[in-house]
Image (cartoon, rainbow, N blue to C red):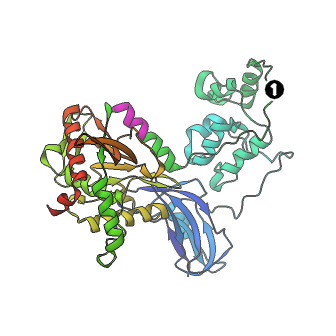
Amino acid sequence: MAVPVIMPRQGNTVESCIVTKWMKKPGDAVAVGDILFSYETDKAAFEEESKVAGTLLVAFFQEGDDVPVLANMCVIGEAGEDVSMFGASIGAAPAPAAEAPVPATQAAPMQTLDAAAIAHDLGKISPRAKALAERTGADLSQVAPTGPDGRVIARDVQALVERGQVVTPAARSLYAGGAQGTGLGGRVTLADVSRAGEAAPVAQTTAPAVPADDSYTEPMSNMRKVIAKSMSASLASMAQLTHNMHFDATDIQALRKSFKDRGEALGLASITLNDIVLYAVARTLAQPEHRALNAHLEDDGKTMRYFRQVNLGVAIDTERGLMVPTIFGADKLSLAALSAEAKHLAKACQAGSINPDLLTGGTFTVSNLGALGVESFTPVINPPQTGILGVCTIETKVKLVNSQPVFYPAMNLSLTYDHRALDGAPASRFLKDLKHNLENFTLLLAK
């Protein structure tokens, strides 16, 4: 019996996912547990395992396609089974079994589509193909679509590039609507493109030719695009300012050593300095006088939303980019429970299996670059939050004690805050209270 495989819903906030790679092709045998395809949301990557055995009869989407959750991705069954009922449910035709490369020296038979039609009909060009065309200047007026239902896919654009069928800047401006086409209804034709290319001035240069292998390009991942957009919006829309303050880390270093040496029986041996800092941040933010940093600035800076508990975002470095999972109710957790939750979330992020719902809802964020030796930095706020704390490396400093110089371990803290939400004095008071709590951490644990 034919069984459809759907695009899973990874969290309540996810509406669609991008197909990154097919591991199986139509006609391939599939066993239970085989990876069928990989996909990603704007924050995490996943792989879909087969729940049944059989043959992959049909795939409805291509790599690079943005697929709505719960849509049929493919069908597994016995060879020869009817799958039309599944294709009709999503209005897509089967994908070809494999993408055969197009030789650079041989022009494929062409089904000519003018560039204006493709650019304005996104149903006929995949996101990956569109991005590749924009980056390379491929002449879409000469494309030969090989995707389902006449869809232009990435290999079609790559074939244009390999054959040298690219568009000059003048022709690209023609595509953008800068000139009238001479075709039926004013459509841009190949002749219009050719004239535009001939009219384009030829740049003169005496610079030496760059070797073909001097550089390479690759598309940004969906997650990287989201990070770029978010960080740009953050800096463009907020009045961000960073204050720095260091504290004496003697107490937390001694406590960390005690946990490591004698805390195994109590499950405390794995507690790190970062866990200790997270605990102190959560307890300090919970103080009413610091509510402006445990808040969201909303409605274009017109409304402050204050939170009764601290939902602490923790920046995690992964191979795919920065991820910020949330420890909900961090101010209510014991040190051991907070440490365990932080490690669980970090492991899920690095494995790419984090639930996207756990990457939302943060009220304040901590980013620790101390392990990389960073002495001071200016972390960027994750909107609509009003603050983020950067944790830096430990340095040896000197201070006077009873008129005598004493060396001590010092850790720097870099607080970036939104000056629209609070002023410098309350931001500095938060740092001062956090410094006190970290320098007297054993007393903080007793509260």
Residue interval drawn in magenta: 231-237
As drawn, 151 above or below 135:
below
Q: Is residue 236 magenta?
A: yes
Q: Is residue 335 visible?
A: yes
Judged left or right of residue 37, residue 373 is left
The C terminus: image quadrant: bottom left
Q: Residues within 10 Å of mark 1 (few under 14, many from 20)?
A: few
Vertically, is 8 above or below 278?
below
* Image location of residue 325, percent across then percent down: 37, 57
Q: Which residue is found at the position 51% from the left and 61% from the top?
A: 90
Q: What residue appears at the point 70 percent right and 53 percent down from the top-left corner?
A: 146
Q: Is residue 61 above or below residue 110?
A: below
Q: How many marks?
A: 1
Residue bearing the label numbered 1: 208
Classify the position of the N terminus by image quarter.
bottom right
Q: Amino acid at mark 1?
A: Pro
Instruction: Indicate the position of residue 125 as horizontal and vertical percent values.
Output: 61, 46
Q: Is residue 72 above or below residue 308?
A: below
Secondary structure state at the residue bearing disc 1: loop
What residue is drawn where x is 68% and y is 35%? 137
- Is 245 included in the stretch rendered in magenta? no
Residue closer to the observer: 78 or 441: 441
